[in-house]
Every structure is written in C-alpha cells, then in structure tokens.
C-alpha cells in the first residue's frame, strides 16, 4: 500500500503535475525524498514490522466483524458482496481522513503512519477479496454485476477518500 517507490513517485507527481490534493506532498516527506518511507531512523525494522502487524491484526479483526455484522443483519450472503464494498469505501474514507490529518499536522511519526495507514487500513480494506469476488461473479455468468461492482467500488472509494480529505481540510 505504501511501498517506498510508489510513495516517492506519488511525491514526484504531486510536485510536478499538481494532481494530488494539497498537503499530500508534505505528508509523504517530499522534503527528504532520499529517505525511505518504509523505515524510519527512529524505528528498527523489527519495531516497524511489529507496528504494521499490530495495525494489520486490528484492521483484519474489524473487517471480519463487519462481514459478520452484514451476515447477521442481512441473513445468508447474496449475489452482491455488500460487506466487501462497505469495507473498501469506509477504508478509502478513513485513508482520506488520515492523509488529511497528517497533512494538516505537517506529517506524523513514522509509527503512526505505519500503524494506521499501512497496518490498520491495509488489514481492513479488502481489494484481494474484491478481486476474488469479481472473478466468482464472472464465473457464475454475472459479468454485468461484476462490472457494476467494480465501477461502484472504485468510484465510491475515490469519492470517499476525497470526502475524507475535504472533512479534514474543513477541520484545519
């Protein structure tokens, strides 16, 4: 999700093309592009990995409980994966809020970014499940439903991330 080459490329796109929302370049340490975003001088590789693992465990547990909640209230799973769609949209909203918060603060500790952005939200969002469910719909002959699911997931996710950034910009 936040691998160093992608993050560095994101910073370059922000600075060169001005396509990313204001504040993202500061959050991704654009002032120090040579420093790896994956590990901080203050966190050992073991501590950074442990921080991501803790966040990932919490995110995965939240995702599991979301799925259980949908199953409890909706009954047997239907043809449309509502829990996965909800996790992806909520995760995108939370990522927007997190990025907005970090940008408003001029960044945060590496531990905070690893715990929340890489770990918690990485464990909560479910694009691997999204891909599997799309393939299953296609194999069941529901290609139209799969295309609709993909479009809704991506468009709603991007819109929710943008909404999170707007929320945090208004709070700043």
Image (cartoon, helix red, strand yellow):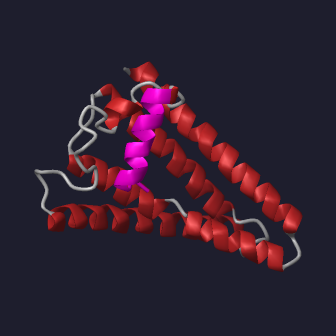
Left or right, 100 with reference to 105: right
Residue in the picture at 81% in, 59% down = 147
Which stretch did the figure color magenta?
1-16
Residue at 65% over, 57% down: 85
Residue situated furthest bottom in the rendering? 139
Q: Disc count in the image?
A: 0
Relative to 159, residue 121 above or below: below
Above or below residue 2? Residue 142 is below
Task: Identify which residue, 78 or 129, lies in the foreground.
Answer: 129
> Image point 53% across, 47% down: which residue?
92
Does residue 72 appear in the picture of this structure?
A: no
Residue 139, quarter of picture: bottom right
In the image, residue 69 lies at what x, y percent?
57, 65
**Is residue 4 one of those drawn in magenta?**
yes
Q: Residue at x 36, y 65 (%)?
A: 56
In the image, 46 versus 61, the foreground residue is 46
Q: Position of residue 167 (x, y in %)?
A: 48, 27
């Amino acid at each position: 999700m936040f691998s160093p080459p992608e993050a560095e490329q994101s910073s370059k796109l922000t600075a060169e093309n001005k396509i990313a929302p204001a504040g993202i370049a500061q959050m991704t340490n654009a002032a120090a592009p040579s420093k790896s975003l994956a590990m901080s001088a203050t966190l050992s590789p073991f501590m950074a990995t442990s921080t991501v693992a803790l966040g990932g465990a919490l995110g995965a547990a939240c995702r599991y409980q979301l799925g259980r909640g949908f199953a409890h209230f909706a009954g047997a799973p239907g043809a449309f994966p509502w829990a996965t769609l909800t996790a992806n949209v909520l995760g995108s909203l939370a990522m927007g809020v997190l990025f907005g918060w970090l940008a408003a603060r001029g960044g945060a500790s590496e531990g905070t970014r690893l715990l929340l952005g890489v770990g918690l939200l990485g464990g909560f969002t479910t694009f691997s499940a999204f891909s599997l469910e799309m393939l299953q719909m296609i194999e069941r002959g529901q290609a139209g439903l799969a295309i609709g699911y993909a479009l809704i997931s991506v468009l709603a996710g991007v819109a929710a991330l943008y909404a999170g950034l707007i929320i945090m910009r208004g709070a700043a």
